[in-house]
Amino acid sequence: MKDTPLSNCERDFLLKAIEEKKRLDGRQTYDYRKMKITFGTDYGCCFVDLGRTRVMAQVSGELVAPKENRPNEGIMFFNIELSPMASPAFEQGRQSELSVKLNRQLERCLRNSKCIDTESLCVVSGVKVWQIRVDVHMLNHDGNLMDAASIAAITALCHFKRPDVGIQGDEVTVYSPEERDPIPLSIYHMPISVSFSFFQQGTYLLVDPCEREERVMDGLLMIAMNKHREICSIQSSGGIMLLKEQVMRCSKIASVKVSEITELISKALENDKRARKAGGRCGFAESMPQERITALKTDETSVEMTDASETANDIVQKAEVPLQTVPSPVVPAPGVGQVGEGLQNTWGLEEEEDGDEEEEEQQMEEEQDEKEDSREGDVVEISDSEEEEVVILHPETQDKTSKKAASSSNQKGAETSKQRKKN
Amino acid sequence: MFSGLREKVGQVLVPGDEFCLEIPETLSLSEPMKPEKVLLGPGLKRKGDRKLLVVKSGVLRHKQPHVFWVENQQRRYVPARGETVIGIITVKSGDVFKVDVGGSEQASLSYLAFEGATKRNRPNVQVGDLVFAQFSVANQHMEPELVCVDSAGRANGMGVFGAGGLLFSVSLGLIRRLLRPRSDVLSDLQKLLPCELVVGMNGRLWARASSVQQTLVVSNLLQSCDTMSPPQRQQLFRRAAQGAL
């Protein structure tokens, strides 16, 4: 089955919104969606929710013969499954381009960064080593699969415990968890991938793109980094030219995001450990809220309403609103990367300032409105010396297709046809 | 007859629930026999001679005198004749357009099915455009067919549209609530901010307000009130009106 096509109107709207520094879900440019990490009942099972993107990782271990050129190293194996459950665009059982790309990136992120001590996975040199297999299943696709997959994989690896092994002479015994406590893997560091999408040849940059943003983006930059600010892998796709400053800026943002995410992961691991120790109920099934068919889900979409208070007056204002100074979209000179240096996001700041200005204007205009209102009561005509202008915004919707809009636009018309004084 | 059905109005039913037709045991000879009718809406199906089967989960609704249906919140759209939907043009081939309507199959839309279109005067439709159209053919055996004219050959609001707005999808239940006469969701929204809405029965909504920000607000509000009860929704809208979100 084919995916829903992206309409031209969505594309245009998204690009326009990005130019205005707005995102579909009300996030700021550098914000991640809400992240939730839960664990399964078994060791090594991890679910990651990133907004509506949902990924499951399961780690399993197996005793195998080692590779010939590395007789005393364990084997890591990564596998990403894109099932049609995640998105109708994914096909069952076929290696798509996307899945190869994600698999490769995950391998580079986790295996090539040598974050796992493979030598400790050796049981008998040249004969038996542990093969650790990480299966990542996509459960729902709403963009940024790579970040979710990398977080799920590394968290599952941290959570995983392999059975203890004893060697007596030539005999290798694998102990069940009841006989001996299972052993966690030794993990040196946690590489986490952070995705940046670029729009309009790299003019605009967004962190953690959602599915629709991914569809209109020009290029993607994935940086895998650990909390020590060491870059584990970096990959740019989409064929856009990036400046050195842009990459530097992205790496600074990535370092902030990675430290936040690492903290979240360790907190989640800690919570799970405590729950298991206390012998309480833990695992995926317990983490799910009780949902009945009739229960109303209370997940709210976050709405950014920074200028909602002005909505009433906005149309009236429109005639006089000065040109907004759009903050320069070009990435500033090196050293201005604010996020990495503990400063605040300039884009957000400028927006707030704009808001303040607008509010002031609004107040002034309200005062004017009041004056006018008082004047409207009088029958006396205002002298001609004062310039007057009538602004009537015609409801454009009358000839449009909307059936529903008619009443609302009439309301709009009524509001706007108020006489307004210029000066 | 079907008094069981009347009792269940307003309650939740699940697929597989059955209702039986009771036949009065004694027939009065003096009064004339009055045949009693029951009209079944979506979600209810007749099974055999005197049984009713529920095929969708949701709340049973009733309209005087004898219409019953199950109100549900599904997201999957099944084309039905006469419904107006928002489609996305995917292919332009020869004299038909292929339109994605969110159903299992793409619908076809003839280029002659636009107002004022003739063989020479073709409508200007590009791949990726949105059309508001009506199903003229929709059954399980045939490819669904759309038209952008009514029986009088007038556009009547249908046709290509969509510049400057945002398309998003919600559940079919919310769409029906929006299309209801004197819809409460719509009146709440109207009070909040003026906007232009196109409502497709296939769960797609297109909104445009005076600015990008406000369009986003409208879309987010509508998406989030999908699963809310009226008091919750009113609270959300009140907060939105105060700009607290």
Image (spheres, helix red, strand yellow):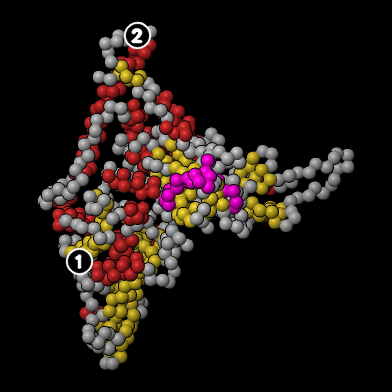
Q: Is residue B218 a member of the stretch shown in magenta?
A: no
Q: Which mark is residue A381?
A: 2
Measuring from the top left, give residue B175's x and y in whole percent: 51, 44
The mark tally for this picture is: 2
Is residue A45 something one can see in this rendering? no
Task: Write the residue at 30% across / 86% down.
Answer: A65
Disc 1 packing (10 Å; few <14; some 14–19; many ≥20): many
Q: Which badge, 2 or 1, is on the more N-terminal residue?
A: 1
Farthest-out residue, top: A380
Secondary structure of the residue carrying tag 1 is strand
- Residue in the foreground of this view, choosing between A201 and A18: A201
| Residue situated furthest right in the rendering | B29
Residue A272 against residue A366 in the figure, above or below: below
Q: Chain of mark 2?
A: A
Could you tell me what secondary structure mostly forms the magenta stretch?
loop
Residue A228's image quarter? bottom left
Report if residue B124 lies within the magenta region: yes
> Which residue does the image show at 36% across and 35% down from the upper left?
B210
- Region of the chain picked out in magenta, as a range: B116-138
In this orientation, which residue lies closer to the viewer: A201 or A62?
A: A201
Looking at the rendered image, the quarter that the C terminus of chain A falls into is top left
Above or below A53: residue B126: above
Residue position for label 1: A232
Whether residue B63 is situated above or below residue A4 in the rendered picture:
above
Image location (x, y in percent) of residue A383: 30, 9
Query: Residue at image x 42%, y 24%?
Result: A414
